[in-house]
Amino acid sequence: MATTVFHDLLALMVESDASDVHIKTGVPTVFRLGNGLTDTSFVPDADTMEMFINQVATQEQIQEYKKHGDLDLSLYEDGVGRFRVNIHRQRGTDSVNMRWVKNTVRSFEELGLPDTLGKIAEAERGIIFVTGTTGSGKSTTLAAMLEYINARYRKHIITIEDPIEYEFTDNQSLFEQREVGLDTSSFSSALVHALRQDPDIIMVGEMRDRTSFDAALTAADTGHMVLTTVHATNAYLTINRLLDLYSKEEQDSIRESLANNLHCIISQRLITKAFGNGRVPAWEIMVNTPVISNMIRENRLSNLPAAIAGGGEDGMATFNQSLLALVNEGLISEEDALEASDNPEALKMNFNGIFLSSEKGGGITG
């Protein structure tokens, strides 16, 4: 593709280091800078919106959009970069949201992520979930894990995405990247067929339904590594969300399968930096140790947070432990840390040097 009618706007977006652009018919376009929204002077009319849609979508995609009112696709704008695009209707008019995909895959250190993710990525089999809300950097973390493998190991890696975000160049590993809607009809179909394509690692852009999760469990159970994302804010809620895909009668067998096949859950949130522009990640890491596995199998999920807090030797960390470290390093403010915490009262105690037994190993200490 050469250029679209939004070329100059997208160039300004990249120059401004905005993560997203929100384009509505007849109103000023808005950039997301950090956690805030900033107006621009660009006001597209209906003809411009229609022209853009015709430039980026196939006729088949346009018909799908007219039928359902939503369309996801990827865009490479010459001389500017790659973007993840969502086109949708609101109040009878076209709207476009685009996220800038920084195609250079960054290292764990550059992203502010812990080195333990490298050891996690080296696992031979199982499922790794990267979880968080929209815009929390899940895809970026997955890309960093895959590039870590690519630099070190001879693996056949298949990615299934909607749309493709990061383009990988074969280094030590061999990549095949499949885009839903262009290369395959659905996540679940691609997952099922991937098992016949001799993969070592399968990356699924998002775990959206039961059929996809069933296929992921099968892949892990047959000796493959599966990396994927889920919209959930922590490990406890991730497992609950997966179990909710099944009836009560089926959940015992799914817990057993999860206990056997889960490798790790990495949850993350982006926090505004205390000084300067940008955001830094806070994370929770739950590794499926024998203790964690038994809790999942026996439906003692409420005990998971305490087990994670005491699992530092196994590479685990809670959000509060991560947030406390970021505050102590001066990267984020105490106020923002408390707002991001699942348990702000406990974090407030940590700021004062008071830790519960599960965090320090022994009664309340100071």
Image: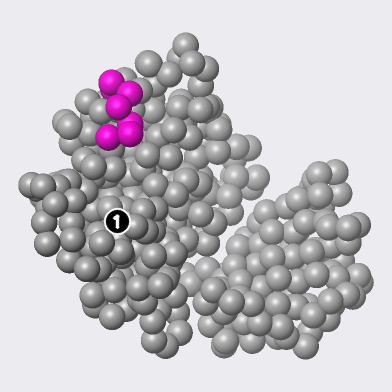
Q: Secondary structure at mark 1?
A: helix
59 left or right of 205 in image: right
Residue 301 on the magenta span: yes
Residue at 36 percent across and 53 percent down: it is 343
Residue 76 percent location from the top left of the image: 61, 69
**Which residue is the site of mark 1?**
346
Q: Amino acid at mark 1?
A: Ala
Residues drawn in magenta: 297-303
Residue at 44 percent across and 49 percent down: it is 233
Residue 207 on the magenta span: no
**Closer to the camera in the image, 249 or 70:** 249
Quadrant (top left, top right, bottom left, bottom right) of the N terminus: bottom right
Residue 182 visible, this orientation: yes
Residue at 66 percent across and 82 percent down: it is 38
Residue 215 percent location from the top left of the image: 45, 28
Question: Is residue 324 shown above or below 363?
Answer: below
Q: Quadrant of residue 9?
A: bottom right
Residue at 91 percent across and 57 percent down: it is 92
Residue 83 visible, this orientation: no
